[in-house]
Image (cartoon, rainbow, N blue to C red):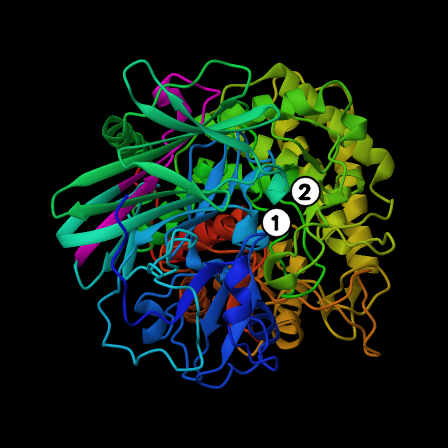
């Protein structure tokens, strides 16, 4: 293969280990990971930083003291900086693609840094998101300088006694150059990213076709199409597969098909991943490369396919046919949306995201496709969200039902009945995608974590918690499904009655509450309110039944009144005119904002207004966004059993906008809502929280629990100005 031309503007090269002794290093220079993660100042201009990249590769990297625009490296970097990345991008730098059974996160630099195969909760093949390039990635990007002003020549301090080196050398990854533009293709989950280089312009199209379109339900595919837009652009694909969350190096080899086609396959234990593409591949440093040139109007495709390693090889993907089918699928699905209001764009993008988080074969809905993206950068508040929380799934179904999607509600109801089985008394707060109950939590100590946020966890120990509010959310979802015209299901009806029988005996118990605190159980006010919701909705169901059980309606009316009176007496601080987080406490909790939304008290009740204003006053950030609860008491002690802090919780901030609209402060509600919309990244996605200090999204991403209340608030604000349902 001919050498790529040398760029005189390169300021960083990777060299084999024997040449490391010839690199002059300033020992005072911090590593890029240390400097970035701790907020240190950049190294002085001309300083050389040597960073260990892999077992056989080092990189000599010239720093710069010039400020770095958000999302774009300095001009010198963009002019041919080829190196291994030592940390992932910002959370908001990622976009989602998926096939409704798993999902990938694609960074602005063209790198796929997170992909679990074959399911959302399977071990990751690309885990660079929680570590470095060493833990797996697939990057496709330009292999030439981009269209920036000329950069200064490299400083004389960088000395490489290596003879004639190619730039980029075969040991380098594709350059981590942020794209100039990106977007989803219409109302779909097909991502487009574009780069402008000195040689021309290029587009990379990324997507995962829904498996039912392929007729291969157990064979996920990710397809990447490189399209030349103008001129001629040299490109590089670099794939580093690391199975079991970056821990296992697979056996990678080439397979020659009978028709002469060469394919690359990576095998480790039960898994195999097949790489197909029109460009010739070669291997260096346990990484698979392809160097190629794309001209205007030309399209070169690549495909990555998973299959169980003991089974026959999968067929290579038909990229263009798969693209056409995938776009059609999303267009037809979005066409069912009943919402036609002024916020259609963010609502539709949120609906597509929620659909992408739905596990199509079972109907389960994951809270997020990631694990251990931190709520506190550098801290320990890192959790695995790749499971089905009953609460999150129930409110997701509520949003889908109110925007016209009934099939998803039917599928989830079937999933719920299978998961709960014949044992509603032992209802868990979360399950696996198919209803699995064992979600044992463990830590992956070989991963450094996103921006050194440790530990990285898989599984979730909160599965065994008692959270009484879940009963209310589940019953509310079943009630809404019935009210929306979903056909009656006798087993679902009986399940609902058994859930209330359980609550009848246990609603007085303390629990861990909606926020899954890892401190002591308490009598959380929100939990009691949602127990009231469960009883209230079941009474309404029975009142509409032709032959309700004798005496049951009257008995549960008394139960409903008892719960209501107990909450108002023990969960309300009369002196401060606000409900509190738990009985006998003084702390506030943003979940109290749901009191008027679920109908526990009317919006004009003075206790409701007092609670809204207290939360605005005591739990709001300077931006007006809302914290879930105070994580520290007056003496600075953590109150939830965890160290560190967290950001503004986006769902709670949407709840505040809802409440403001309900009490007549519609202009204020609309202003808050639009400021929340501005927090979305450039392709419309939200994580769990917003860090007001770092001015960044934090937490697992994208988060269903953020996109659901976005939809709900849009519907409420639209309704405040007129009818929002088109049919």
Image coordinates for residue 147, horizontal then vertical, percent: 22, 68
Image coordinates for residue 43, horizontal then vertical, percent: 51, 82
Specify the quadrant of the image occupied by residue 138: top left
The residue where tag 2 is placed is 533
Q: Earlier in the sequence, mark 1 or mark 2?
A: 2
Could you tell whether 494 is left or right of 51 in the image?
right
- Crowd rating for badge 1 (residues with CA inside 10 Å; few <14, some 14–19, many 20+): few
Disc 1 and disc 2 in contact, CB within 8 angstroms: yes
- Residue 632 got which mark? none
Image coordinates for residue 385, horizontal then vertical, percent: 62, 44
Could you tell whether 323 is left or right of 407 in the image?
left
Quarter of the image containing the C terminus?
Answer: top left
Which structural element holds mark 2?
Answer: helix
Asked whether 675 or 285 is in front, the reply is: 285
Residue sitting at 77 percent across and 68 percent down? 587
Question: With respect to residue 149, does 291 lie above or below?
Answer: above
Asked whether 410 or 129 is in front, the reply is: 129
Could you tell whether 306 is left or right of 78 in the image?
right
- Crowd rating for badge 2 (residues with CA inside 10 Å; few <14, some 14–19, many 20+): many
Magenta residues span 200-225
Could you tell whether 409 is left or right of 332 in the image?
right
Image coordinates for residue 293, horizontal then vertical, percent: 21, 47
Asked whether 438 or 353 is in front, the reply is: 438
Asked whether 491 or 150 is in front, the reply is: 150
Which structural element holds mark 1?
Answer: loop
Whole-number angstrom distance, CA of label 1 to CA of label 2? 8 Å
Residue sitting at 49 percent across and 77 percent down? 48
Quarter of the image containing the N terminus?
Answer: top left
The residue where tag 1 is placed is 599
């Amino acid at each position: 293969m001919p050498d790529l031309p040398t760029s005189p503007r390169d300021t960083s090269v990777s060299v084999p280990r024997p040449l490391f002794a010839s690199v002059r290093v300033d020992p005072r220079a911090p590593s890029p990971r240390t400097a970035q993660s701790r907020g240190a100042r950049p190294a002085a201009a001309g300083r050389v930083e040597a960073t260990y990249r892999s077992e056989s590769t080092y990189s000599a990297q010239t720093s710069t003291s010039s400020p770095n625009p958000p999302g774009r490296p300095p001009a010198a970097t963009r002019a041919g900086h080829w190196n291994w990345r030592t940390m992932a991008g910002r959370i908001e730098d990622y976009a989602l693609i998926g096939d409704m059974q798993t999902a990938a996160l694609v960074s602005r630099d063209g790198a796929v840094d997170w992909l679990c195969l074959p399911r959302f909760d399977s071990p990751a093949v690309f885990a660079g998101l929680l570590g470095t390039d060493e833990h797996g990635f697939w990057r496709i990007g330009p292999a030439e300088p981009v269209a920036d002003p000329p950069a200064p020549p490299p400083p004389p301090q960088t000395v490489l006694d290596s003879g004639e080196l190619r730039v980029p050398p075969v040991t380098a990854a594709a350059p981590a150059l942020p794209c100039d533009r990106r977007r989803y293709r219409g109302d779909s989950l097909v991502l487009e990213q574009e780069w402008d280089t000195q040689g021309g312009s290029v587009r990379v199209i990324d997507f995962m076709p829904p498996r039912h379109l392929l007729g291969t339900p157990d064979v996920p595919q990710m397809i990447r199409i490189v399209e030349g837009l103008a001129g001629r652009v040299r490109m590089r694909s670099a794939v580093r597969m690391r199975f079991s969350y970056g821990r296992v190096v697979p056996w990678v080899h080439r397979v020659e098909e009978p028709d002469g086609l060469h394919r690359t396959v990576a095998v480790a234990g039960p898994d195999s991943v097949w790489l197909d593409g029109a460009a010739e591949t070669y291997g260096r440093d346990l990484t698979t490369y392809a160097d190629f040139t794309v001209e205007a109007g030309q399209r070169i495709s690549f495909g990555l396919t998973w299959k169980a390693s003991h089974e026959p090889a999968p067929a290579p993907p038909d990229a263009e046919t798969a693209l056409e089918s995938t776009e059609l699928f999303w267009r037809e699905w979005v066409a069912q949306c009943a919402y036609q209001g002024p916020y259609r764009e963010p609502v539709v993008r949120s609906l597509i995201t929620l659909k992408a988080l739905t596990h199509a074969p079972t109907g389960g809905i994951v809270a997020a496709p990631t694990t251990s993206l931190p709520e506190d950068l550098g801290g320990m508040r890192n959790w695995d969200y790749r499971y089905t929380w009953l609460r999150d799934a129930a409110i997701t179904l509520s949003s889908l039902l109110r925007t016209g999607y009934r099939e998803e509600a039917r599928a989830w109801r079937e999933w719920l009945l299978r998961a709960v089985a014949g044992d509603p008394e032992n209802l868990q707060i979360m399950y696996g995608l198919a209803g699995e109950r064992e979600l044992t939590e463990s830590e992956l100590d070989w991963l450094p974590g996103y921006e050194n946020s440790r530990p990285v966890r898989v599984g979730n120990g909160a599965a065994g918690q008692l959270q009484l509010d879940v009963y209310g959310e589940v019953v509310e979802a079943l009630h809404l499904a019935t009210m929306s015209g979903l056909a009656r299901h006798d087993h679902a009806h009986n399940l609902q009655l058994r859930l209330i029988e359980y609550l009848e005996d246990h609603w007085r118990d303390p629990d861990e509450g909606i926020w899954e605190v890892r401190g002591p159980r308490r009598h959380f006010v929100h939990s009691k309110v949602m127990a009231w919701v469960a009883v209230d909705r079941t009474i309404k169901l029975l009142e509409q039944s032709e032959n309700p059980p004798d005496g049951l309606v009257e008995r549960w009316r008394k139960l409903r009144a008892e719960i209501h009176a107990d909450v108002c007496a023990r969960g309300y601080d009369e002196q401060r005119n606000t409900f509190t987080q738990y009985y006998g406490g003084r702390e506030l909790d943003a979940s109290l904002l749901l009191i008027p939304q679920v109908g526990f008290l009317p919006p004009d009740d003075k206790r409701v207004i007092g609670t809204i204003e207290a939360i605005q006053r005591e739990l709001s950030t300077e931006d007006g966004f809302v914290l879930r609860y105070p994580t520290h008491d007056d003496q600075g002690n953590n109150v939830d059993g965890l160290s560190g802090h967290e950001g503004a919780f986006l769902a709670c901030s949407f709840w505040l906008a809802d409440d403001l609209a309900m009490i007549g402060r519609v202009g204020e509600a609309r202003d808050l809502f639009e400021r929340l919309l501005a927090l979305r990244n450039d392709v419309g996605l939200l994580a769990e929280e917003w860090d007001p200090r770092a001015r960044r999204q934090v937490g697992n991403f994208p988060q269903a629990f953020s996109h659901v209340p976005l939809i709900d608030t849009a519907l409420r604000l639209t309704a405040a100005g007129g009818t929002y349902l088109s049919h």
